[in-house]
């Protein structure tokens, strides 16, 4: 409430509000004498002023501390697709963010990166702390084509937004031949299938080849 001279309550007075750092908090009036303060940006000390008749009349201070948000954080591979050759690599960055999508302003968290399926390797598995809310590791491709989901935990809590790297087959270098039976009965039919593949046995989708 607003108090005038002599301690008299000013009925129906309109108080305006302002924050010294509007990029950190927003202030929304609720009644003539109350307001709601909402954190919207990176943390730091702020002062909220009540303004009566154009004059800063009274203030209160607050400190906005960032908090890790599992749904706001994200795992980002620098490159995709990669060849499924066992040697190609890309940097994986885990951005530890708050609920507003801002990177935490400092490091110090324990970030562990994992793969599903286990097709390739991550090094180091405990990601390197860059000191700015981001953490880095290197993913080295496996030898089986398909999608690899790269996930992370922050202090044991799973990050909701995983990254995906697609591994593609390499250059066709062989036919993989399979028979429906290796010990057929005399006179029975046997189906023989030839599959075009790269050096790691991944199928190569290439039509128009002649098999003899």
Image (cartoon, rainbow, N blue to C red):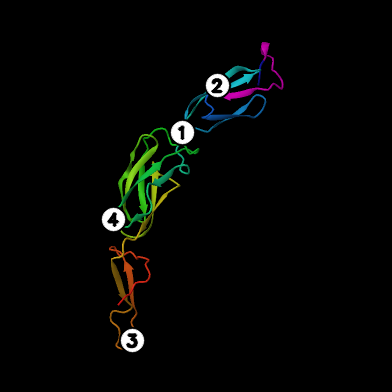
- Residue 135 in sight: yes
> Where is residue 166 drawn, in percent x and y?
38, 55
Considering only order in the chain, which callout, 2 or 1, is on the residue closer to the N terminus?
2
- Quote the CA–CA distance across marks 1 and 4: 39 Å
Residue indicated by mark 2: 60
Q: Give the mark, 4 or 3, whose residue is nearer the N terminus.
A: 4
- The residue lying at 37 percent from left, 49 percent from top is 79
- Where does label 1 land, which residue? 66
Which residues make up the magenta segment? 4-18
Mark 3 or mark 2, whichever is nearer to me? 3
Image height of 129 relative to 202, above or below? above
In this rendered view, identify the residue nearer to me: 155 or 119: 119
Give whichever of discs 3 and 1 has the lower sequence position: 1
Magenta stretch encompasses residue 169: no
Residue at the spot of label 3: 188
Residue drawn at point x = 63 percent, y = 23 percent: 16
Mark 2 lies on a secondary structure that is strand
Q: Please report contact status of discs 4 and 3: CB closer than 8 Å, yes or no.
A: no
* 80, 76: nearer the viewer: 80
**Residue 108 position in % (x across, y down):** 36, 35
Residue corresponding to mark 4: 86
Does dot 3 land on a helix, a strand or a loop? loop
Direction top: furthest residue? 6
> Could you give the CA–CA distance between mark 2 and mark 4, rounded to whole angstroms?
59 Å
Q: As displayed, is residue 120 above or below residue 158? A: below
Discs 1/4, front: 4
Q: Say which element carries label 1.
A: loop
In-image side of 79 versus 35 (left or right)? left
Q: Residues within 10 Å of mark 3 (few under 14, many from 20)?
A: few
């Amino acid at each position: 409430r607003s108090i005038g001279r002599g301690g008299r309550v000013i009925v129906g007075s309109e108080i305006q509000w302002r924050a010294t750092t509007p990029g950190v908090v927003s202030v929304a009036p609720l009644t003539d004498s109350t307001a709601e303060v909402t954190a919207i940006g990176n943390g730091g000390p702020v002062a909220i002023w009540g303004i009566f008749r154009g004059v800063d009349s009274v203030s209160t201070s607050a400190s906005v501390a960032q908090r890790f948000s599992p749904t706001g954080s994200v795992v980002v591979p620098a490159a995709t697709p990669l060849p499924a050759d066992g040697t190609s690599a890309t940097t994986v960055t885990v951005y530890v963010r708050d609920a507003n999508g801002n990177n935490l302003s400092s490091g110090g968290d324990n970030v562990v990166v994992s793969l599903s399926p286990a097709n390739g390797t991550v090094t180091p598995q405990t990601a390197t702390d860059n000191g700015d809310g981001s953490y880095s590791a290197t993913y080295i491709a496996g030898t089986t084509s398909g999608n690899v989901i790269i996930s992370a935990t922050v202090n044991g809590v799973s990050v909701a937004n995983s990254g995906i790297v697609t591994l593609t087959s390499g250059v066709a270098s062989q036919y993989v031949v399979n028979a429906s039976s290796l010990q057929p009965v005399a006179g029975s039919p046997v189906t023989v299938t030839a599959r075009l593949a790269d050096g790691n046995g991944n199928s190569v989708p290439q039509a128009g080849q002649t098999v003899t």
